[in-house]
Image (cartoon, rainbow, N blue to C red):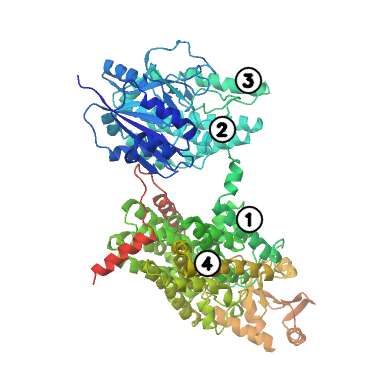
Amino acid sequence: MSRPYVTAIVVAHDGARWLGETLRALVNQSRRPDRVAGVDNGSRDGSADLLAQAFGRGNLISLPRSTGFGESVAEVLAKLPPAGSDEWIWLLHDDCAPDRRALEALLTAAAQDPKAAVLGPKLLDWLDRRRLLEVGVTVGRTGRRETGLEPREFDQGQHDGTHDVLSVSTAGMLIRRDVWERVGGLDPFFPLFRDDLDLCWRVRNAGHKVLNVTYAVAWHAEAAARRRRRITVSGDHPRRLDRRNAIFVVMANLPFGAMLWALLRNVLGSAFRTALFVVSKQPANALDEMVAMASILLHPFRLLRARRARRHGRKKGYIRIKRLMTPRGAAWRRLTDMVQSFLAGEAPVDSTGRHHHATPSTEDEYEVVPADTGAVKRFLSRPGVVLMLALTAVALVAERSLLGGERLGGGALVPVTGGAGDLWAFYTEGFHDIGLGSNAWAPPYVAVLAALSTLAFGKTWLAVSVLLLGSVPLAGATAYLATRHVIPAVPARAWAAGTYALLPVATGAIAAGRLGTAVVFVLVPLYASLGTVVLSGERRRARRAAWALGLLLAVGTAFAPLVYPLFAVLGVLAAVAFRGVVTSMAIALGVPLVLLFPWLAGLVTSPGKILLEAGLHDPALVDAALAPESLLALSPGGPGLPPFWVTGGLVAAALAALLMRRQRMIVAIGWGITLYGVLAAILVSRVTVEGARAWPGVPLAFAGTGLVVLVGLTAHRLAELRAGGGLRRLGAMAVAAVAFSTPLLAAGYWIATGVRGPLVGDAPDVLPVLAAARTTHGERTLVIKASFTVLHGRTPLIGESELPIASEARTRLGTAVEGLVGGRGGDAATLGKLGVGMVAVAPPVSAELARTLDSQPSLARMSLSEAGGLWRLAEPVVRVPAQPVSALHTPWLWTQAALVLVIAVLAAPGRRESGPETVETPPAVAARMAVNVAGGR
């Protein structure tokens, strides 16, 4: 019989305090491995040096801190060719030190049982070396892990022998390589906890045995399970992650009938345990229980994919596995123990089961991670969180005049009234009984606001306030997250996000109440990030990114239609340069057309409205003659904007990038996008729509994105120049100071001046209270201010003022209003036929206009004061008849909802691959573009 070939793999992550002993134990094995390899997952405590000293640099692989255990092992095996048909893999954690004869004992047991494919040692506690941790593991239908040991049970040989078990830990696991490759190894979906159980379950379904060999001993510190080191592979709490993985493993590996019964038990049991945790004042445990269960229920397709991958041998293997699982009565006994503990005044026992059966030791010096300041402080110390908190503080101080009012409104923003139910009713009804009546399609952004208002507990004002007043910190957050794969240096990324968030487009949009531009400003960084993924070339990720990009592009187009043609031009150019992304780009550009079709079709008849956005189009909000220096400084004109020199530092830093000899393609692409946005802004600012110039805020947001990303990507060159000393060092420091002047000056100026514009936090009600009270039979009220509008018993909702009115009715109304104001008689009868029963004049009411209206025999004054005037028609008022509704209206709304759901599912992240994630950053994309352009000459 040939000698087995053993490959030992040690995975380390901040485990230097244990790794030294682990490596010494490996070197001193009575039967040494034939090949060794080490993996360091971004350790910061010298673990990589220890591995390099023990194995040599050639046998060490360094991976990011977020890499899971299974991904690390898969990465090693991908680089190590198979060594024959009898090769075994010995997996060791950095906190698991095997006994001198551990490997020899495992191989001896494997030789005695040819069906054994996975073997594990008896695990003892690292500090109290007599205490048992594990002699094999099983699991119940609710996912609780069971070791069959009593708490703090000492090893006295009572469990010795070789036992057929459901699972063993990956700490010291010995597995045949051919079996590993046949079943797919450790699932990367489980970066931590329960990955061993899932692997062993699949091995048993493949017809092999899993054995625990107690004559092989290893001492395990359980560093991750006991919080002895920070967990970086997931942002979830270990308890939550363990519970979620526990349920998922059971649901993915049980046969269909048993899975349904287990799912019902888990849902009911989870609800009961959550209630017990709440009443026993354990909110953290209750939250973990709820979130873990919700993670399973809200991602059914993820579970279906996992079950499909495990379908082979599942039903047949369950016959053998069922006898190894926790007996059915054990779950009820645990539940009884929980209730008894609660009634006795104790905390309910942890329902998830410990990762191992060891209980924490009070004398354990490593129980708390050194230098760990707690989850909250760690979260608050992250650069992205610090940036968003700083931007939030800046926004709150600058918007101090808008906070605490009863009704946000002014400028382009209609005073915010109503709730989520009102918006849903407005969006779904076919005939809108407002103004002069309309059967046109409601603006699609109303549905977005209605959905957000629903999430905001039905409060439309809260949703609008977050989107508009919170657009600066939101834009900073999206810019920071969107550039995580684009700008590797964290300081440069924080600068880029902060600079982008404080561009004049944002502060101008807030001052003028431009909700559409504010939403688009938040979304533009996501467009750039998803567009980069679409261009990355990896088909599956690019396709998901294309669906997500299309969905977000539809949202942006609903608020500001100009977004679509601006992005479409860039998308077509990208598809020409990158021929392999034509389909993905077609998806991204096609989704908005499909979702917004009826409404977009209406824009074809009025193409000028493409340049408008959500809200009112007021000439007072736009500069009639925008200065060239304003556009070059990314300032779109209008109220609430800083001086042009505030953004001068950003432009100067971008100009300095032109002097760099390297990364010329990146500089060219960044400046190309910037000039494209500026040229588009120039064209938009010269077009007149409905009597006023269009506002160029959206194209300048594109231009600002190009400049900010350009400077951020070339920021690392400053460090190189500074290291050169002399004039280069002075030049680098000058460029850095100039670049940082933009966010600092923008924040300081905004704080000092506040929001200077028509937007106010206590906007008056457009409709007089008396008029609303007297509207009892559907009469409408004509409100005269600088222009005129017709209201129906209340202040209009967001979006209602944008509904088109039939040209004939509007012409008749306009003629009647002119005659009424001019003192011509007989116009009140026309108003009555249009359903108008009252005439309201907004303050201040001129004496001449009051006398003119009083002189009309068909008008009777109801009130006149500084708050305005109100007159009632003496003529008969005809109720406006309902207009016919399209037969396709309701079916299309249902179709639209179904399409949104389907696209959201297609855009959702799929299962992570076991290999390292490859996402091309803009340097790589730029290089590919240069090759494509050169090849096309």
Relative image position of residue 418 (x, y in whole percent): 64, 60
Question: Which element carries disc 4, helix, strand or loop?
Answer: helix
Of the numbered discs 2 and 4, the one sitting upstream in the chain is 2
3D distance between C-alphas at marks 4 and 3: 68 Å
Drawn side of residue 455 relative to residue 608, left or right: right
Pointer 4 local density, CA inside 10 Å: few below 14, some 14–19, many at least 20: some
Q: Which residue is mark 3?
A: 340
As drawn, the label of residue 733 is: 4
Q: CA distance from mark 3 to mark 1?
A: 43 Å
Cα separation, mark 2 vs mark 4, equals: 59 Å
Please say whether residue 172 is visible from this viewpoint: no
Mark 2 / mark 1, whichever is N-terminal: 2
Secondary structure of the residue carrying numbered label 3: helix
Residue 246, above or below 583: above
Q: Secondary structure at mark 1?
A: loop
Observer-nearest of 635 and 223 = 223
Indicate left or right for 768 with 233 as reference: right
Q: CA distance from mark 4 to mark 1?
A: 48 Å
Q: Nearer the viewer, residue 176 or 423?
A: 176
The circle on residue 459 is 1
> Does the rendering let one see residue 253?
yes
Tag 3 near tag 2, CB within 8 Å: no
Looking at the image, is mark 4 or mark 1 nearer the viewer? 4
